Amino acid sequence: MTLKETLQIAGCTDPGRTRARNEDAIGEDAELGLMVLADGMGGHSGGDVASRIAVDTIIAELRQSLARAGGGQGESNDEISLQVREAVIQANRAIHEAAADNVGNAGMGTTLAVALLRPGRIILAHVGDSRIYRFRNGELEQLTVDHTLIQELVDRGLCSADQARTSLNRNLVTRALGIDSSVAVDIREELVMPGDIYLLCSDGLNDMLEDAMIEDVLGRHQADPHEASRELVRHANESGGRDNVSVLIGRTSLASRTRGRWYHRLLGLRR
């Protein structure tokens, strides 16, 4: 059974109700089990250019690096995590160089969220305030920590989570691709369970919707990621749509007659 057969991917992106253009970008490679989402920096020129470069570069880099390694077969998850990190670094370099070559794109940047499914594991990477959530057993959990000024205040105990959600400064990011010649990338690895749903989103979603609403939508549409993605975007727009809104949903889907055998294979166990 291939990764494409075990991961159902759906995505949706929309300019929202108040923005003239969409500076978000999404992309996926079902054969690799790869999802990439980027949110071009609002207020900077070329945000849409930066986000598209980020998505296209990361997909291209991982296609090449995983192909050289035989699709990642036989490589440790640590080695593949390094390949994900290197792909993000290459994307940062590409955006930074593109901005230097075109004065009209000076200062452009983007946030980023990446998820790469491997047998039994999923490798996550992010920069900025684009988020990755996991929906498991009816519960939603945020797997990333925003790289924002307000999150730093929360971490230091100087601001509550409720205050952070309504702060006018909640979208001031402390990290982004393309702004500097180097970038710090957060990488983590998680165990995959049958039926897990992974949600990548730009802040245009979570700024408009409470986690409880996101959890409810994913719960009602567990078997249909396409409908879930459309409904999340619709709710964000109905709640104000103050920003571009993008979502990518990946659902691990296993046939009941092979579920037990494949689950143990994912975990590297024998039955």
Image (cartoon, grey):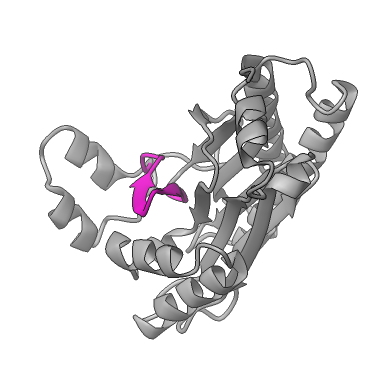
In the image, is residue 113 above or below residue 263? below
User: What is the x, y in percent for residue 51?
Assistant: 64, 55
Q: Nearer the viewer, residue 111 or 143?
A: 143
Taking the image as shown, residue 250 lies to the left or right of residue 101, namely left
> In percent of the image, x 88 and y 24: which residue is there?
70
Please identify the quadrant where the C terminus is shown. top right
Residue 40 lies in what quarter of the image?
bottom right
> In percent of the image, x 83 and y 28: which residue is there?
71
> In percent of the image, x 18 and y 41: which residue is there?
154
Is residue 54 visible in this depiction of the protein? no
Is residue 120 visible in this depiction of the protein? yes
Q: Nearer the viewer, residue 151 or 201?
A: 201
User: What is the x, y in percent for residue 67?
Assistant: 88, 29
Q: Which of 172 and 106 is in front in this view?
A: 172
Q: Nearer the viewer, residue 106 or 141?
A: 141
In the image, is residue 101 above or below residue 156? below
User: What is the x, y in percent for residue 143?
Assistant: 40, 40
In the image, is residue 138 above or below residue 90? below
**Residue 120 colored magenta?**
no
User: What is the x, y in percent for residue 55?
Assistant: 70, 50
Please identify the quadrant where the N terminus is shown. top right
**Residue 140 colored magenta?**
yes
Q: Magenta stretch?
A: 129-146
In the image, is residue 17 above or below residue 39? below
Q: How many marks?
A: 0
Residue 12 lies in what quarter of the image?
bottom right
> In percent of the image, x 11 and y 36: which residue is there?
157
